[in-house]
Amino acid sequence: MQYDALELEDIKARTTLSSVFARFGVRVSGRGYGYASCPFHLENTPSCFIDDRKGFFYCFGCGEHGDHFGAVMQLAGVNFSEAVRILGGTRKLSLAERERLERSRRAREEQELREQRALRFRLAIAWSEYMPIRDTLAAEYLHGRGLDYSNDWTFDLRFAMLSYRGYESADSDKPTMLGE
């Protein structure tokens, strides 16, 4: 069966993704986004990230991911059409509702593009500030593990010297800068 994309967007707009998980007994921490114990694999620490604002989930443990429909399909063991029905089904949209959903979709896509550009910018700055791995503590570490670096496989490895506060010895009472 073919579905209208905006009618599917309407279904997702009618309910939060965390409430979809809650229907199946999965409790999500936080409001708007948060973590839950993944219902798709056994785990001790919550690793399934659920974002109501963007309408997606991702498990850092098993890699399962998706949107409202994917969650219902996995949690209930049903196909897409049945997931649409479980989520309330489609309805005819007025022209005003279609325009509102289209504006919302465009705004979400534009926000994602801005976030992607900002991330690429931050990564480029970080890359330029870090040094190649050659003759660094990281190269010494690799050598100590029997992994001598080679430009063939380490051309894109970078090293950043981090500073942190700590105690020089177990007897010290005063913290100092370490790792510089």
Image (cartoon, grey):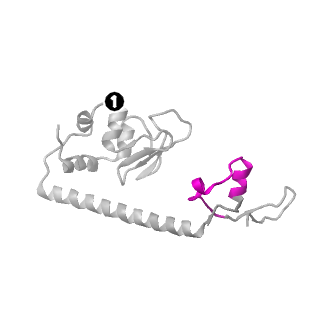
Residue 146 painted magenta: yes
Look at 27% across and 32% down and name the residue there: 79
Quarter of image, res 158:
bottom right
- Residue on which the image places disc 1: 77
The one nearer the camera, 73 or 149, is 149
Look at 55% across and 69% down and name the residue there: 128
Measuring from the top left, give residue 28's x and y in whole percent: 45, 44
Which residue is outermost to the top?
77
Residue 164 painted magenta: no
In the displayed structure, does residue 120 sit left or right of residue 16? Answer: right
Q: In this view, does 93 lie above or below 136?
A: above
Mark 1 crowdedness (10 Å alpha carbons): few <14, some 14-19, many ≥20: few
Image quadrant holding the C terminus, namely: bottom right
Look at 71% across and 47% down and name the residue there: 145
The one nearer the camera, 90 or 146, is 146
In the displayed structure, does residue 42 sit left or right of residue 114? Answer: right
Magenta residue span:
138-160
Q: State the SS at label 1.
A: loop
In the displayed structure, does residue 162 sit left or right of residue 4? Answer: right
Look at 39% across and 39% down and name the residue there: 22
Q: What residue type is labelled 1?
A: Gly
Q: In this view, does 29 lie above or below 140?
A: above
Measuring from the top left, give residue 52's x and y in whole percent: 37, 51
The one nearer the camera, 132 or 19, is 132
Q: In this view, does 80 lie above or below 110?
A: above
Which residue is outermost to the right?
171
How many circles with numbers are drawn on the protein? 1
Image quadrant holding the N terminus, namely: top left
Measuring from the top left, give residue 174's x and y in whole percent: 82, 65
Q: In this view, does 34 lie above or below 165?
A: above
Quarter of image, res 80:
top left
